[in-house]
Amino acid sequence: MELIQNNPYRIAGILSNATAKELEKQRGKIRAFAKVGKKINSEYDFQDLNSITRTEDSINKAFSNIEQNQDKVNYALFWFLNVNPFDNTAIDYLKNGDKEKAIEIWDKVTQNKDVNSKNFSAFNNLGTFKLLSKNQDEIKKGIEAKIKLIESGYFENFVHSVADETFTIDNKKQIEKLVDELLTQFKNQYSSSETLQLFSNCNGSTRNYLSKKFTEEPLHNIESQISRSKNKRKDNKIDAYQFGLNLAANCKDDLVTLQSLLGITDLKYKTIADQLANEIMQCGIDYFNESQENDSNKDYLKQAQELNKTALSIAVGSLIQDRAKDHISTLEEMKDNSLSQAVELLQSVKDAYETNEAKIRQQIKDLMENDAEIKFGLKTINQTAVDDNIKNSINWKEVNNLLNAVLDSSSLGKIKESSNNKLKAEFIELAKWLKENSSSNSVITRIINDYKKIPPKLTFKVTSSEITNTDNQPLYIKFVRYIGLNLNIKVENPTSVNFYLKYINPDGSIKRNSKISPIGYSQSTTKEINNDSKTIELPGWGNSDECTYKIGEHRIEVYVDEYLIHSKKYVVELAPSERLQKEISSAEKKLRQINQTNYLENEIRFARNEMSEIQKFKLFRGSSEKQEQIQSQQKKIDQLTEKSKIEKRRNIKSQEEKIYKLKMELSAAKY
């Protein structure tokens, strides 16, 4: 600590309770040394402190700083004094560089003890040494020792040891002086919260003074910022959005400081927080009204909503909170105007279509019941013509004109941003219905495609994902029942999200249930996401009795608002035991085929045919020649037959070895 390292008493080379005579003697000696440029050392420089350089100016200033009684007390609280044998022994240890022994002595006379006439100096000396530490717990103990000394009835003994006997002092003011000096020493070294922690062992009055010191500046800063914002807003409402943003940003650190010092239940904090929230909210109101009056092309509704949400996050009082909530609710309803208008338009088209369809089908029914030629089969109803009549009962050109007017790119963006998931789902369902039933669907197709391209504004980020299977089994056919997906997420703000899932087969088709699956998807689910959410468990697809998945690479696609936010591939395959059983079955079938196969059958047949020819009568061939030819041919047949048997036995053995090996692998297979 700077005030200890360069304390005037240290520069002067004396203890703080030196007598006037000792002080004057030291003053003369040290000045004489300084004039001739001789190095000045003191027995009170203490090895455990930083080295000190004395100049003539610093020496003069040091003696000047300890002339007045109040200054003597102020500086003495950051130095050492020697008033009893305990101090004398401890200071001797300090002179010799043995700080542990010195601390041990002062600890012994102060630990778990009140301040008294015999240990008041030990409280001061121990506190001074603790304040030199880099360890915050030690500094805390040093502060506690100093405050305990000043608050005690024996602080007067300390004062009269370092100042005149006639000098009186206000203990409370002296504590404030000490705190002020310590705060100066701690500035730029510790944060506000760390500094407060250093004083945590002090009593209520000291902490109240600290709180006042720490809160005065941030309170003043916030009040000044609010005042400036009000003046600028009144003069220029169209820029009030930026004023509100700046106000929130400029007051953020000061507000955090006040909250940590006072807590949100403190009246001062509540008052300033509500004033700040109210001004930010008013910036949003003025900006919205001014922008609306001037037909601004900016997204002023969204910007005003942003300021109101900021105000709500700051407000403490229920009055300001309720006001902010009302504004947010009103703006939310206004934000959904585009969505509500789109749903009303699409629903009106669907209602008209279904009304016309019902009328036409009733007319056909009446006709079939009353027309004699139809009843007797002389005439038939052209169902294609009926369907065409139903489709053409709507003026699709006019519908498309309305769609272009109501669902432009700006409106689609607002619909996408809406948090009304239920109404958005209705919008998508109606749009897809219209695409399916319109005889002129190019406009609605383009609108749907444009909507799909707009990314949703998610308040979470998918960091990774894992495929799940029933009972955490591997993705083998024999184990697969329900396959699902877990999304690992990082949440920015809590929200409710409708997820749409596509379970895509290896051939590209989508797994669906025609009765329950949303159009174009396998299934959907709604999940509530809060600030503590780490994982979203999406529902699985499958069957509890058997595997419904084909072998090959599958894919799960996750959509929010028709937009693909995540995709995960996975492979379903046979378990090793299933694969081996299949291979064994195939190998055994091949073994049976080998056993039933006559090897070299064609060659042997050909040789036997040759034998038949040899055995026939030939003119001019003697019997001996014939016999030789027969023997030769028979030998050839025998050789082929033996070769056939050898090859068959070899193949049988090879196949049996293969089957044996597969069965051994099967017996060792884990799955």
Image: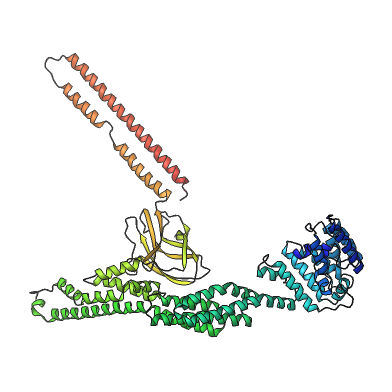
Q: Which of 528 and 252 is in front in this view?
A: 252
Q: Where is residue 637 in the image (x, y as percent from the top left)?
A: 25, 25
Which residue is the extreme one toward the front? 35
The picture quadrant where one finds residue 86 is bottom right
Q: Which residue is rendered at x = 76% and y = 69% of the image?
A: 143
Q: Which residue is rendered at x = 26% and y = 21% of the image?
A: 635
Q: Which residue is rendered at x = 19% and y = 77% of the image?
A: 393
Q: Position of residue 283 (x, y in %)?
A: 48, 80
**Vertical placement of 502 versus 117: above or below?**
above
Q: Which of 618 and 286 is in front in this view?
A: 286
Quadrant occupied by the N terminus: bottom right
Q: Which residue is rendered at x = 62% and y = 75% of the image?
A: 259
Q: Where is residue 591 in the image (x, y as percent from the top left)?
A: 34, 39
Q: Position of residue 250 (x, y in %)?
A: 55, 73
Q: Can residue 111 be seen in this view?
A: no
Give the image's coloring scheme.
rainbow
**Left or right position of 423 against 38:** left
**Left or right position of 158 against 535:** right
**Left or right position of 340 against 213:** left
Which residue is the extreme one toward the bottom? 319
Q: Is residue 2 visible?
A: yes
The picture quadrant where one finds residue 165 is bottom right
Q: How many labels does the image show?
A: 0
**Left or right position of 126 against 590:** right
Q: Nearer the viewer, residue 252 or 327?
A: 252
